[in-house]
Image (cartoon, grey):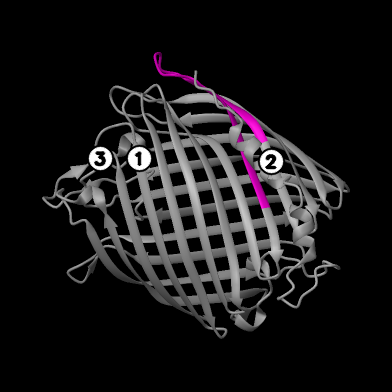
Amino acid sequence: MIRGTPLGLGLLAGLCAAPGLALAAERGSASSGVRLDDYSDVVAVRDRPREAYRPDGIRIGNYLLFSEVGFRTSWTNDSSLAGGKGAPSRFQTAPSVGFELNSQFQRHQLDVKIEGQPVGLEDGEVRSVDGQIKVNWRINIDHASSIYGITSAVTRHEEDLEDERPSGRGARSSITRSNVEAGYARNSGRIDAAVGARYQRWDFSDTVLGDGTHISHASQDYAILQPFVQLGYRLSPTTKVFGSIAGRFQENRGDNVIDRDAKGAEAHVGTQFEISPVIRLMLKAGYVAQDYLQPGLTDIGALVWQGRVEWLVTPLLTLSLASNREVATTGFGEASGRLLTAHSIRADYEVWRNLLVLAEATLRTAEYAGENRDDTILVGRLGAEYMAGKNWLFTLGYEHHQLTSNVADLDRTLDKFSFGMKYRY
């Protein structure tokens, strides 16, 4: 059995409780010309209202329609393809289109968002498409009770060092992630509760090599069903405690040798509160137990957590610290699953009202249950977003990924530059 340790959670709690942090934030920035004493407009940089740079949309009955067209250009260099079956560098420009319907009902909600982008342009033909569709709905039974649901499907061909793709393969296989969640929620005074179920599914397409050979990834396809119950209690306007219990039924048939079907459960308790009006904290910790039906596979029992600290340093700068630990599936060797841990720090800065920049660094580790494999992934990101009036949006980004593994030939380095432009209306 594989077990986790709460080192990341302890580090996160220690950072957020550092002496003098809240005092420094509350004093604000002398150069910004904005006082934070009344905290009447203290919001994170990404949440600041920018109505002058948001499209107005088109009203259709009880809906607002937002549409966009544009393109995205990217250049990617993957060290694992040097000398392999594909070129180590890839340059791609593709158009994109999307629309969003936001409901304006007084009591209910039905929102729809759709995006699409061709990514397999060859000889003038579209071979594959990335995109997503998401539907959020809610029916209010009365002022305190509602029935809600979320349905989404996302298909991506993006390079990811966590997708367990072996080195030297030039073609990218797509991953489709589907999610359905529905439940009953009640919010009565200080108490809120919900009961429902969520179903998640991952489908991996075949990889097609340059000579036309198909490599199947069907053994990695999996689905997880989680019926859940959660309860929350608000101690004060800024402090809340909560807990949840969920079942965990996993279908992952694997191949002719390994069947990773499993059943188990998970439980969490947590809290969210404000150390001061400019320092906000969320901590959640729990335990996941997962038993595999096939004899010989390593069962998993591990401490998991999720934590986030948001520090509004000044009205123009927001710092975020996050730590996360979870149990995930795998298709590697005879491993039954993975224990993924991630720690990250992010800074969002508002240069001008319509120009935002970000810098982010993440350290991820993966421990494989039942196999002698441990991965470490370092990710760095820089980005900028410029809003030219209500309609034009320009984005610029750079990413660096580096994977180091104790398994030979799995080390990889990936660099990616991207530029995008959208017309929104």
The label nearer to you, 3 versus 2, is: 2
Q: Is residue 238 left or right of residue 359?
A: right
| Image x and y of residue 193, in percent | 77, 41
Residue at mark 1? 404
Whether residue 130 is situated above or below residue 40 in the rendered picture: above
| Amino acid of disc 1 | Thr
Residue 167 lies in the magenta stretch = no
Disc 1 from disc 3: Cα separation: 25 Å
Residue at mark 2? 14
Residue at mark 3? 216
| Image x and y of residue 276, in percent | 80, 55
Residue found 24% across the figure and 37% down from its top: 409
Disc 3 from disc 2: Cα separation: 46 Å
- Ranked by sequence position, the earlier of labels 2 and 1 is 2
The label nearer to you, 1 versus 3, is: 1
The image's mark for residue 228 is: none
Residue found 66% across the figure and 40% down from its top: 196
- Ranked by sequence position, the earlier of labels 1 and 3 is 3
Element at badge 1? strand
Magenta stretch?
Answer: 285-309
Whether residue 346 is situated above or below residue 331 in the rendered picture: below
Residue 414 in sight in this render: yes
The answer to whether the residues at label 3 and label 2 have Cβ atoms under 8 Å apart is no
Element at badge 2? helix
| Amino acid of disc 3 | Ser
Residue 425 in sight in this render: no
Disc 2 from disc 1: Cα separation: 28 Å
